[in-house]
Amino acid sequence: MKHIDTPSPIALTEARHSLAAHGYAFVSGAAASAALGLSPAACADLVESWNRLSLDTYLADGGKYRYRRHASLIQEFDPPSLTEVAYRPHWQPKVYNQLHGGVFRHFDLVEPAIGAHPVYRGVIIGLGQLLASLMPTPRWYIEAHQFRIDASSGEARPTPEGAHRDGVDYVALALIRRGSVDGGVTSIFDAQGKLIATEKLAEPWSLMLLDDARVTHATTPITAAGSAPIRDTLVITYRKDGFLEP
């Protein structure tokens, strides 16, 4: 286990208010970068690591368009720390993921150098602080997923399971890179299934924040519109009552 340094709290006041009032928030890349202290130079080697993700072999549709790495962490607040826990497979119950739930899914770990990267750590800790201001907790049980959706061989689906919850308290999605693609529009639905918001994240480090108990979400397929038809994201889930287990 490895304890990681703690950055100062972030200031995303409008996002906090929207998340509390509506169950979701979208943050522009410029605002998120300013709040999280990001710069292209500081992020360059982190962003490049998405070129080394491994194929997700669990897609129920047999597709070979999704690549990913995964890590599990615990964020403590007293004293502040972020600890990467030993390898554990990803698991969701079918009630949250009817397509891929109910089985242990084994993905390659986030690379050690990326797990120690100050931008990666700062984003996870900073967003955890923001979310804890809405739902006080002594610790977060966190899963971090690096995703690449690649449409070079045809239509590719960021959320093949459709509109869904993740079974956690909060979900944060950061767009890392949007290549030459069409589609990729995210829709947010309330507890009754009513569409309440849509957004196409396009700017690097733009954020989508979700109260997972109040809303579901889905993203439309992407198709190639040029020579680099990829969509890279960092998805971070926060749960106060332990990791999801059978």
Image: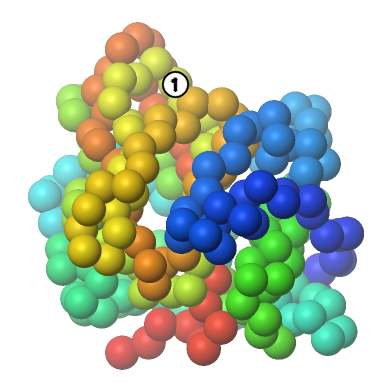
Quick one: which residue is furthest to the front in this view? 21
Q: Check disc 1 and give the amino acid type.
A: Gly
> For this rendering, which residue is in front, 15 or 144?
15
Q: Quadrant of the N terminus?
A: bottom right
- Judged left or right of residue 218, residue 33 is right
Is residue 241 in sight in this rendering? Answer: yes
Instruction: Tell me where residue 186 sits by quadrant.
Output: top left
Position of 94 relative to 100 (above/below)? below
Q: Residue at x 38, y 67 (%)?
A: 214
Percent coordinates x, y for residue 169 in the rendering: 48, 74
Percent coordinates x, y for residue 94 in the rendering: 19, 76
- Judged left or right of residue 86, residue 77 is right
Position of 205 relative to 123 (above/below)? above
Residue that label 1 marks: 179
Q: Quadrant of the C terminus?
A: bottom left
Which color scheme does this rendered protein use? rainbow
> For this rendering, which residue is in front, 152 or 197?
197
Percent coordinates x, y for residue 220 in the rendering: 25, 36
Percent coordinates x, y for residue 174 in the rendering: 55, 44
> For this rendering, which residue is in front, 107 or 201?
201
Quick one: which residue is furthest to the top in this view? 226
Q: Secondary structure at mark 1?
A: loop
Q: Residue at x 46, y 57 (%)?
A: 22
Q: State how many labels appear.
A: 1
Instruction: Tell me where residue 198 sits by quadrant.
Output: top left
Position of 18 relative to 176 (above/below)? below
Q: Residue at x 48, y 83 (%)?
A: 243
Q: Residue at x 66, y 47 (%)?
A: 14
